[in-house]
Amino acid sequence: MVDSQRDSQARSSAVRSVAQNLDWNGLLASPYQPSTAAPLIADQEVGGSIPSGHTISDAPDEKSPGASACIQGASQVARLTQINQSGQTMRRPPLFVSSNAGKVREIEAILGFPIEQLDLDLPEIQALDVALVARDKALKAHAAAGRTVFVEDTGLYLDHLGGLPGALVRWFLATIGPQGICDLLPEGADRSATARTAIALCDGGTVELLIGETSGTITSAPRGGGGFGWDAVFVPEGAEKTFAEMSQSKRDKFSMRRKAVDLLRERLRP
């Protein structure tokens, strides 16, 4: 009982520390505003109930915050089909909607071929669950692009903090940096964590979620100069180096993003 209370107090202290240091006005500012139809959400069943390496499909409903999204600049995006040399209409490959150049490079390296990318500022719900965030973002991206799209969202779930920061990790990084992520875990605390990637593929009628997960631990200090985001503080299970210390080929062996992209590759096969 004493140990449980001590862990609970340490967790509460860490969360309070983050709350005090986070720039909440900046976090909630445009373009990443919480949707009025989907306020701040705790980690729910959608992502957690999908095992790594599995998919789930659902059809968007009219109440979805992304179903009626209207993004400026959509008229400048090419339409769903293109004409080949024989004059036949053929389906175009899905468009990757992302502003993160690091993610684009990594996904292209995993797929083994270039992908078409569109950089859009999309309102993003503030949820811990990457599956919820990716699904909502895919609906908005499809509404803007007018063609089949896929989006990606990755979160970092620390066991000692009950799953924080999850999909909110980008805001934690922007405020307290990689060292701050390490410092969220006091000496002697459980440093285990899960990295989870959700890719959402949307054709306008359905949203398919492709989930990849990697278990690991959080270092006491950042290590390595490669990768991006929190790569320098995460050591995947079965490895001794952080993602940031690994070559791309080595990182792909453990990568949660590679696991999700492998599912995407299979889904895109003709």
Image (tube, rainbow, N blue to C red):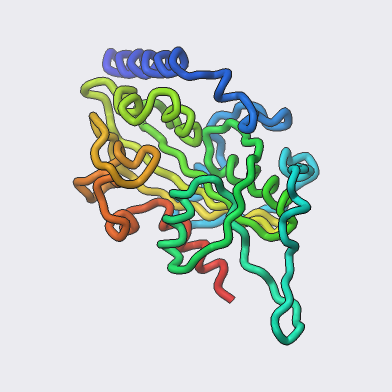
- The answer to whether 118 appears left or right of 62 in the picture is left
Question: Is any atom of residue 96 visible in this view?
Answer: yes
- The answer to whether 173 appears left or right of 132 in the picture is left
Residue under the image location 56 percent in, 44 percent down? 131
Asked which quadrant contains residue 203, the reply is bottom right
Q: Position of residue 267 (x, y in %)?
A: 56, 66
Q: Residue furthest left?
A: 240
Asked which quadrant contains residue 250, the reply is bottom left
- In this rendering, is residue 87 above or below 222? below
Asked which quadrant contains residue 185, the reply is top left
Q: Position of residue 17 (x, y in %)?
A: 40, 14
Residue under the image location 25 percent in, 34 percent down? 219
Q: Residue furthest front?
A: 76
Q: Nearer the viewer, residue 124 or 40?
A: 124
Image quadrant in which the N terminus is located: top left
Question: Is any atom of residue 53 visible in this view?
Answer: no
- In this rendering, is residue 128 above or below 146? above
Residue under the image location 21 percent in, 23 percent down? 188
- In this rendering, is residue 17 above or below 220? above
Residue under the image location 66 percent in, 54 percent down? 207
